Image (cartoon, rainbow, N blue to C red):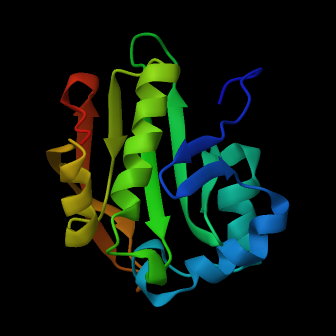
Amino acid sequence: MHPGHSLPILEGKGFTLRPLQRSDADAVLDLLRQPGVARWWGSYDTEKLEHDFFSASAGMTHLVMVGDEIAGVVQFHEENDPGYRHAGVDITLGDAFQDRGLGTAVLRRLIRYLIEERGHHRITIDPSVHNDRAIHVYRKVGFKPVGVMRKYERDPSGQWSDGLLMDLLAEEFVEP
């Protein structure tokens, strides 16, 4: 986010996306340690959580998905150079909240915000090439594969793993 821009609170059907707060740290750490999350996000301790989620140097805006409890985290960054303006997003859901349509609904709400309120014409996301569930959801909202980024990130075992760069243009955004 750029200076002077307040963090959003975004309402969706059955969920609210609100800014991550320090008081959420324990719940987010528990979520990141769940097997279905850790498989893709790696292992987290309080130091890594602090660096990745609360450090200004991370360059990301983090929102938590709440209903009755914290269901997941969605994050985005913005490139504001006029020649390259776009946003990148990422999402994770706790194990109990997967396969219920929540990820699709949350992404649609965040993307609508980034296009309509933040003025982005292009959104990117970069799942592991092996994360079929995530890729399926991203395609449902309009993301298209751009290409494979070889040895893009270290997986939880420490091995280099390929990532799939996907992007979505505002005119390709799919809403029900």
Name the side, left or right, on which 45 lies relative to 74: right
User: Does residue 23 lie above or below 118 as drawn?
Assistant: below
Instruction: Pick the quarter of the image with the C terminus.
Output: top left
Q: Position of residue 52 (x, y in %)?
A: 65, 59
In the displayed orientation, state which residue is furthest to the top.
82
Q: Residue at x 52, y 86 (%)?
A: 34
Looking at the image, can residue 38 be seen?
Answer: no
Q: Position of residue 12 (x, y in %)?
A: 50, 48
Q: Position of residue 71 (x, y in %)?
A: 56, 70
User: Does residue 60 lie above or below 153 as drawn?
Assistant: above
Q: Which residue is nearer to you in this view: 67 or 20?
A: 67
Q: Residue at x 41, y 25 (%)?
A: 115
Q: Which residue is nearer to you in this view: 109 or 82?
A: 109
Q: Position of residue 25 (x, y in %)?
A: 76, 70
Looking at the image, can residue 71 be seen?
Answer: yes
Q: Quadrant of residue 163?
A: bottom left
Instruction: Pick the quarter of the image with the N terminus.
Output: top right
Name the side, left or right, on which 122 lies relative to 29: left
